[in-house]
Amino acid sequence: MAGKNSPQDQGSEALEKLTKERDDYLAGWQRAKADLSNYKKDELKRLEEIARFANAEIILDLIRVLDSFELGLSAMERMGEVEKGIYLIRGQLEDTLKKYGLERIEVKEGAPFDPGLQEAVASVDGEEAQDGHIAGEVERGYLLHGRVLRAPKVKVYKKRT
Amino acid sequence: MAKILGIDLGTTNSAVAIVEGGEPKILENAEGNRTTPSVVSLSKSGERLVGLLAKRQSVTNPQNTISSVKRLIGRKFSDPEVQKDKKILPFELRESSDGGVEIKMGGKWHKPEEISAMVLTKLKKDAEARAGEAISEAVITVPAYFDDSQRQATKNAGEIAGLTVRRIINEPTAAALAYGLDKQKNEVIVVYDFGGGTFDISVLEVGDNTVEAKATGGDTHLGGDDFDQLVITHLVSEYKKQEGVDISKDPLALQRLKEAAERAKHELSSSIETEVNLPYVTSDSSGPKHFLIKLSRAKLEELTAGLVKKSIDLVREVVTARAPKGAGLGLQEIDEIILVGGQTRMPAIQNAVKELFGKEPHLGINPDEVVAVGAAIQAGILQGDVKDVLLLDVTPLSLGIETLGGVFTKLIERNTTIPTSKSQIFSTASDNQTSVEVHVLQGEREMAADNKTLGRFILDGIPPSPRGMPQIEVSFDIDANGILNVKAADKATQKSQSVRIEASTSLSKEEVERLKREAAEHAREDKEKRGLAELRNQGETLVYAAEKALREAGDKIPNETVQDIEGKVKDLKEALTAGDTEVIKSKLNLLSGALQKIGEILYKGTKHEPGQAEPPKEESN
């Protein structure tokens, strides 16, 4: 039998070390290749997402213009008849935004308040049965490609105490 | 291997990040946002809401909406801070049997760590959905001034949320990690953290792999929200002066104004003036009223100067006061300053900090995310990812060759991860050129002469052919050890020549920094030089093309046109010798216009009689 430090032992130790090293390197290399491939897939998804929401800031700014337009329109309505063309301009602006994936979030007065879709900005006194239900819309809300871009701001009933 | 989550558990907002592929990455929550409000609520229907949803319903349910729980965690009920906050917070607090704090939500009493755990549970769940794997471990950050009991309570919150808290680290330390400053030796770092509701200053000392907080200070009730409030107050009073209407009495108008004021504050970080424009903001007996007030950056700075000064005075005190109040250091002894928190985007704050220390602060990483990024880096070190990445080096400077006109053409850009290889096809500059010299350079300057030569070699035996015809592929290959091999091969004859350069990455940090700085300083003149060189190349190519066209098709072209082109070639040649960019451009355009005539004439396939040819079109520039 060979001694503890015989050439055979040394040889098999070295072989073991090299085998381990080889396995480590192979695993590292495979992992690096897999990481790259996964990264590419993630990046593609991320780019698609970025492309879909690239306009979000501009659209948000335009919604604010639309808000003011609505306010102006109702002020004009209160003062008398409004030229039809003004409604057509509003329609044009709404259609344009719709083309880019914008969708209005409808708010029903009297429906239960849902913080997943709406933001409460004020409480108003109401009957017990109305507690926690929507008392009215203060500012319109919108979805962009199905994601809440701006939650509608609502007033919520609170039972009188 | 399972990921460890880095969590910045903030007073008003929280953020999470992981290390992926060696890089820290902020994970978006389920609502698609990079930060999550640290707010928890029990809705009237008994549903637990966390984050944005809890915040959205806080107005209708203030007693059951818990925010700023970080102000209470791990503190005694008798703590003066708790007593102070008790007066401001809209929810109920009481003393627990062990002297701690308990918070009432939905008729039940909870410990602050239970509330924090609810925030952490959401952060964990959303992070798992983004990362696509289960996460069971985390690194959580806390303010440097947190004592043992506050740290322990934060750790407990993590455990309640089902996370093994591998480490609790200080927020300023995380910020230093994010900027890689933990590797510095014997440096003193000041972290200036101006968040939404709190202002923290920390003085850190970096030793051998340790970061120690030497002094901390700040104001737990000073933040960006105070800036917003000042802007709103100003706008309300201006409007009152202008229109005689107190808009603060109209809750809905005030709501619109608040949002507009916050937007205006953000805009003034990048522009000098903005307009707060709210049409139909309110109405009175005279009809609708509009809000239109200009706000300049100077006005914003004037309004908030008191807050900025207060923060700077606090910084001075924490740095210079003797222990235990401060670090007992001179301002000039501070080596690095890091800015954290959204409010530090304000140029006036950046300038005030710069002026105080006489140094540029670090502000490259998003100040809302820097703490989470640092937490993720710490997590990465624990999980072994970051160590692995250190094995991959990058090229400190760009590598390339000299091309026509003394221009430096980069093949491998600075900061490319190695090993890597790149190749590009080049050609000859004159007719019948049988050899090319490949001059290998390193640097960031536009012209070859300003960069460092790494080596040169000649590839010969190229078959005689017109300029631009031979295809010479130059390839650069850097192996994992930073050894660069440059090879040039003629595609037609397969002849090749190469050089091996050992020292392409062995530059000292200082040398790299100096070269980068020089490149930035000379960027403009270098660009002009390069522009001129490229224009010259273009000019010479056109002269060559014109002469060739006249040689080959001169007999088919009317004499007038020939003479015209010859004149313009001569003009361009003279301009090239003189070297004035504008003159070269104009002569180049003239010749190029004249040359188009040849094409037109040849295309028509008929030889025009002298006099029939249209006068050459002249372009003025």
Image: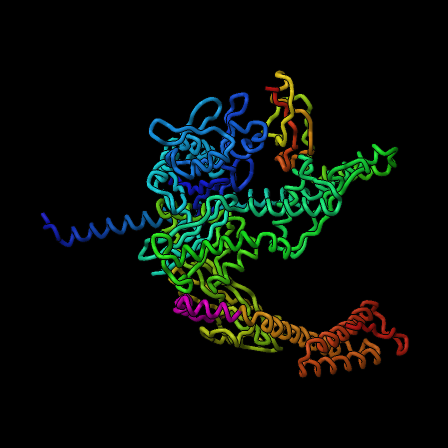
Residue shown at the point (52%, 44%) measured from the top left: B196
Percent from the top left, x then y, of residue B418?
Answer: 43, 59
Closer to us: B171 or B3? B171
Residue B514 belongs to the span the image colors magenta: yes
Above/below status of B444 relative to B449:
above
Residue that appears at 36% across and 48% down: B381
Q: Is residue A46 visible?
A: yes
Segment tinted magenta in the rendering: B496-519
Task: Please tell me which residue lies in front, A130 or B439.
Answer: A130
Residue B51 forms part of the magenta stretch: no
**Which color scheme is applied?**
rainbow
Query: In the current view of this chain or complex, which residue is farthest to the top?
Result: A129
Q: Split into 4 quadrants, where in the image is the N terminus of chain B?
A: top left
The residue at the point 85 percent across, 74 percent down is B607
State which quarter of the image contains the C terminus of chain B.
bottom right
Image spot of residue B424 (x, y percent): 54, 64
Q: Classify B289 as above or below B323.
A: above
Total numbered labels placed on residues in the image: 0
Q: In this view, does B619 lie to the left or right of A37?
A: right
Seen in the image, is B612 located left or right of residue B472? right
Q: Position of residue B551 (x, y in %)?
A: 74, 79
Closest to the observer, B97 or B117: B97
Residue B49 visible? The answer is no
Q: Where is residue B352 in the image (x, y as percent from the top left)?
A: 52, 59
